[in-house]
Amino acid sequence: MKVLFVSIMILILIIGGESTTCTCNSHNMCTNMPSDNVYYLTSFCDSSVACGSFSGNCNEYYSADYSRFGCNSIISCCKGSDCVNLKVIDGGPSCSVENSAGKPVVDASYSTCKHFTGSTSCGWSDHISVTCKKTSFTIEDTIEGTNTDKLDGYIRNHTIPLGPCSYNSTFAEVNQVPICGSDLNLF
C-alpha cells in the first residue's frame, strides 16, 4: 500500500503537480515566487495591516504578501488581458495555507475577488488562478499618491491606477479601463 501511495505521488508530480513547499521566513510567510507567476486567489479584509495605515475599506484594491513583493509595492494580477493593480499592504498568507493549497496564494481584497469571480469570497480551495507580477511602481506612483518630478522643465506625474486595468490597449478600450502602467512588457 505504501509503495502504491508513493507511486501515485510521483505520477502526480510528473504529470504536472506543483511542489507544495514554500520557502518560509521567520514570520511563517512564503518568500519564493513561482516561476510561472500563477497563484490561487484568496480574499481578506483586516482592520490593521503591517504596511502603514489602512482605511478599513474592504473594497479598495490591495493585497497581502509583503514577504514576496515588499510593503507598498504595486502588483498586477491578471486573467488573460483582464487585470487589476493592487497595493501591497499586509503580510500573509502563512506557509501552512500555501502548503495546504498546493500552490502559491495571493491574498487580496474583496473587490479583487469580485472583479474576477463576481463574488467577494475567494478561498484557495476554489482554485481561482491569477497571474501576478510585481510592477516597477510603488504606492507613491498611484493616482492617490503624490510622486512627481521635473523633466526638461515640465512636471511629469507618475501615476498608475489601482483596480481594474489592462496591458492590452484593445481590451482597455473595449472594456473602458485604463492601461495598467508603463510596464507594458510585464504581461
Image (cartoon, rainbow, N blue to C red):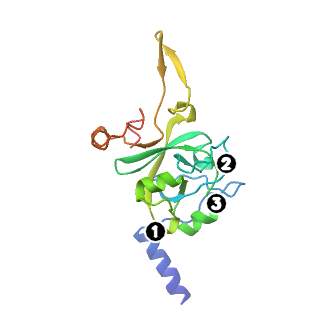
Between the residue at mark 2 and the residue at mark 3, the CA separation in whole angstroms equals 15 Å
What type is the residue that disc 3 sits on?
Ser
Q: Position of residue 149 (x, y in %)?
A: 53, 18
Residue at 66%, 43% in the rendered image: 51
Please identify the quarter of the rendering in which residue 45 is found: bottom right
Q: Nearer the viewer, residue 105 or 20?
A: 105
What type is the residue that disc 2 sits on?
Val
Residue at 34%, 47% in the rendered image: 81
As drawn, the label of residue 55 is: none
Q: Position of residue 170 (x, y in %)?
A: 27, 40
Considering the image in quadrants, where does the C terminus appear?
Answer: top left
Between the residue at mark 1 and the residue at mark 3, the CA separation in whole angstroms equals 21 Å
Image position of 111 with respect to 18: above or below: above
Of mark 2 and mark 1, the one earlier in the sequence is: 1
Q: Residues within 10 Å of mark 2 (few under 14, many from 20)?
A: some
Q: Secondary structure at mark 1?
A: loop
Residue found at the far right of this picture: 26
Residue pointed to by mark 2: 49
Q: Secondary structure at mark 3?
A: loop
Residue at 47%, 49% in the rendered image: 132
Residue pointed to by mark 3: 94
Image position of 114 with respect to 53: above or below: below
Q: Position of residue 99 (x, y in %)?
A: 58, 66
Q: Nearer the viewer, residue 155 or 187?
A: 155
Residue pointed to by mark 1: 17
What type is the residue that disc 1 sits on?
Gly
Between the residue at mark 2 and the residue at mark 1, the CA separation in whole angstroms equals 33 Å
Q: Residues within 10 Å of mark 3 (few under 14, many from 20)?
A: some
Q: Residues within 10 Å of mark 1 (few under 14, many from 20)?
A: few
Number of numbered tags placed on the structure image: 3
Badge 1 vs badge 3, beta-carbon distance below 8 Å: no
